Amino acid sequence: MFVDQARVRVEAGDGGRGAVSFRREKYVPLGGPDGGDGGHGGDVWAVGDPALATLIRFAHRQVFRAGAGVAGAGALRRGADGASLDVPVPLGTVLRSEDGFLADIVAQGQRALLARGGRGGRGNARFRSSIRQAPRFAERGEPGQGRDLQLELRVLADVGLVGMPNAGKSTLLAAVSAARPKIAPYPFTTLQPQLGVLRHGAQELVCADIPGLVEGAHAGRGLGHAFLRHVQRCRLLVHVVDTPGTEGRDPVEDYRLIEDELTRYHPDLARRPRVLVGNKLDLPDFEPGWQRLCAAAGGVLAAFPISAASGAGCAALAAYLFEAVAHLPARYAPEPEPPGEAGGDEVEVTVTAGPRRAHARVNAESPGAWRVSDEDLERLVTMGDTENPEAVDYICGQLARRGLAARLRHAGVRPGDAVALGPWTFTIDTDGTPVPYAQDGLEAPEP
């Protein structure tokens, strides 16, 4: 079964919690805190695997989880890191998340990070200082990333055979390669892309038979619309036409219709090099249609009259394909990531964090309620033990030292306003000191 689209969820491992522990040994009066750090959560990676041909395994398994980090322990023992998870995908797989493009897997062993594991929490030994000799708090592990992904397979082929149903594409593929696609005298015999390998000495050429297109395929009509994406990978297109019109259609109209569908689906396909192939040379009405077709077709590299059924002209066509592809650039470059879009009305402020600087966005959610968006500050709060008063004091001190309060006032935040940062809500005092007052949502306090 050929499956070229799938939706899955990937979940990286959570970081392990830091330990709260104190060294208590006889004859060691100044043991102090010795809680170890938690281990990091495992990542989830996509890995290109040439042994896979479809996305069918993702139809049966839709959630992929990496291992969680182990919690730290006393005696400064660090927890073990969670096991990362490699997810094999076929070559030619495009991965997207709700945020947009992630990766384009086109080479064996190519790796793409799908979800990053959470950091391990720091144990209480890491918070000891000259003024905090016995910290009784530690960090929680950072939650691992979770993402819903869309996987789309685009067949990697050097040559793509396109044309109307029953034009003879499958017969041609069987004539020039060892592939044995289903062949029958009725339209839509091919229900999924078929691959064949052409060999000439030590050279190999991958050829794909794209299921028959019909008028309106770019807009979702017929079977071909589900497979037009595979044409984008091909370096060279071979347009196969039923030249005698055995299906009662005009070959020139068929040619123009398919060319129009390709262009409407993706403008780049209009500039893709192509070869014109007039099929069914062995039939009596071939020559008039071939002359008209050659006169109507423009911009093709070459034109070949063949009979896929008898094999006439197929060897010359195959030899030309090897020669033409050798002079064409590779088209397996990864899909570019689209530029990000800016959010709504935001005030961008700068938060100083030690020697480096980070950018925070402050948004007004409602009158008297604000939200701060900053990855580092959100991590500080998310990993902090907000149920421990000593840990809350540490978090508030960190926010004040990083200059957040002054910049909140610059953005228009007044004392008493609610400020949400990740899962935590606080306000600022008249002197600018962060003061927590709520933990369960963004809601302005009573006046």
Image (cartoon, helix red, strand yellow):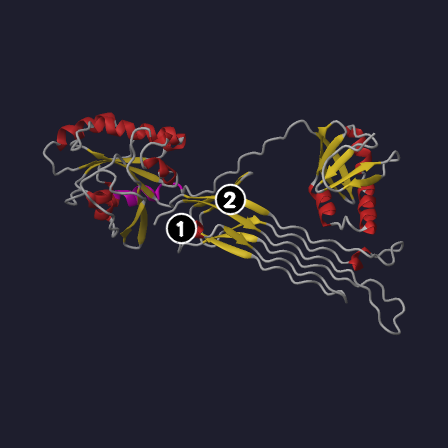
Q: Which mark is residue 97?
A: none
Q: Is 326 in the magenta?
A: yes
Residue 369 position by quadrant:
top right
Inspect this view and state whether residue 83 appears. Answer: yes
Magenta stretch: helix, strand or loop mostly = helix
Taking the spot 83% from the left edge, 36% from the top edge, the residue there is: 428
Amino acid under label 2?
A: Leu
Give me the C-alpha separation between circle 1 and circle 2. 15 Å
Inspect this view and state whether residue 270 appears. Answer: no
Magenta part of the protein: which range?
320-329
Question: Is residue 20 placed above or below 246 in the rendered structure?
Answer: below
Q: Residue furthest front?
A: 446
Taking the spot 83% from the left edge, 45% from the top edge, the residue there is: 397
Q: Secondary structure at mark 2?
A: strand
Q: Residue furthest left?
A: 284
Residue 6 position by quadrant:
top left
Please state if 300 lies on the left or on the right of 337 as rendered. Answer: left
Q: Is 340 in the magenta?
A: no
| Residue 379 image position (x, y, % from top left) | 71, 46
Q: Nearer the viewer, residue 47 or 389?
A: 389
Taking the spot 83% from the left edge, 42% from the top edge, the residue there is: 401
Please state if 101 lies on the left or on the right of 161 as rendered. Answer: right
Question: Is residue 66 placed above or below 278 in the rendered structure?
Answer: below
Please state if 217 lies on the left or on the right of 103 as rendered. Answer: left
Q: Nearer the viewer, residue 128 or 304?
A: 128
* Residue for badge 1: 56
Q: Are marks 1 and 2 in contact (CB under 8 Å)?
A: no
* Residue for badge 2: 149
